Amino acid sequence: REIILKVIASRGEYAESTNQCITIMSVLGEDFPEDIEPSLVANELKGTLALLEKVTEEDIRRLPLMTDTSKLYAMKFLSMLCTFSMSSRYHLCHLSSCLLVKFTLQYGFCEESIHGLATFARALLLDVEDVENSGRISSVTESLLVDHANQHSLRARSTLLFAAVKFFTEPLQSVVERCRNGFNSGMISGDVDNAMMCGYLCCYSKLHGSGDDLKVTQDVSCDFLRQMAKHKHAGSTYGTMSLFRTCAALSGNFGNSLRIKTNEEIYEEAVRTKNLFLLHHVCVNQ
């Protein structure tokens, strides 16, 4: 099921992959409400934060390893649910991150714990605007990658989450470098899906504040688009095409060797896949 879900997501069909993850989690005994109220998510985030209020890197490293097979299975699909719902039902993503953190503290540490903590840090920032604790937990989580046996795979998966927080806590140029490192880690570990998403976020970061000339940003976007086309990753391709069109509209330079979709075609894809981020890009271009 894991491979099937990743294939669906690679086509940009995040809403469908999210629904399938919800079904799997229901079988595993975890149900989510159809309509999630923002107040519910805010309360869950604050309650989970209380469990992490004084937690340090050393505290996390001292946790026992998670050994319960059923819990490890649940953590894997909860982590996937966080990733897929980020683009289609972000309140569900944030609610799932709370479960990942609670399972870690209750049943022990595993690789998915890192992804859960990183997602939770991002959720704190976006839902309750807690920059201080978001930055603290994000930094603690990032430090867990040091010397980890699967650091490249974990970095590729978590870069988008770290970057979302670093947008508010570090110079944007450092976010660009983080995204490049995430892309390289993804290619090294064979995680092409997350590598392509790191490429998209690198373009996004360059456009929104790296200080580079727009032509440079367009050239970088084209380089990543060639990689995305090679690996047939629709989810990142449409987003990067939209960023390219933003650069082109601002610079007046539409020349390139690639076939870039029109804004209307990108909009149709956003509606078809229920991708909220892509819809946002379309609105910016309009």
Image (cartoon, helix red, strand yellow):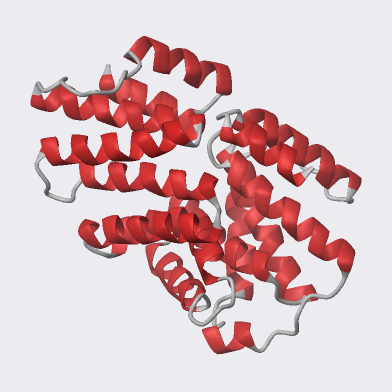
Front residue (pair 219, 99) = 219
Name the quarter where the N terminus is drawn. top right
Name the quarter where the C terminus is drawn. top left
Front residue (pair 100, 115) = 115
In the rendered structure, the answer to whether residue 209 lies left or right of residue 181 reads left
Measuring from the top left, give residue 162's x and y in whole percent: 43, 61
In the rendered structure, the answer to whether residue 262 lies left or right of residue 211 reads right
Image: 214 above or below 112:
above
Residue 261 found in image quarter: top left
- Look at 77% across and 42% down and name the residue there: 32
Res. 205 visible in picture: yes
- Look at 12% across and 49% down and name the residue there: 211
Image: 124 above or below 261:
below
Front residue (pair 47, 150) = 150
Measuring from the top left, give residue 67's x and y in whole percent: 84, 75
Measuring from the top left, give residue 189's x and y in whole percent: 54, 60
Residue 26 found in image quarter: top right
Measuring from the top left, give residue 229's x and y in whole percent: 43, 31
Residue 213 found in image quarter: top left
Image: 215 above or below 108:
above
Q: Please state the total of marks drawn on the protein image.
A: 0
- Look at 52% across and 47% down and name the residue there: 192
Res. 124 visible in picture: no
- Look at 51% across and 28% down and name the residue there: 275
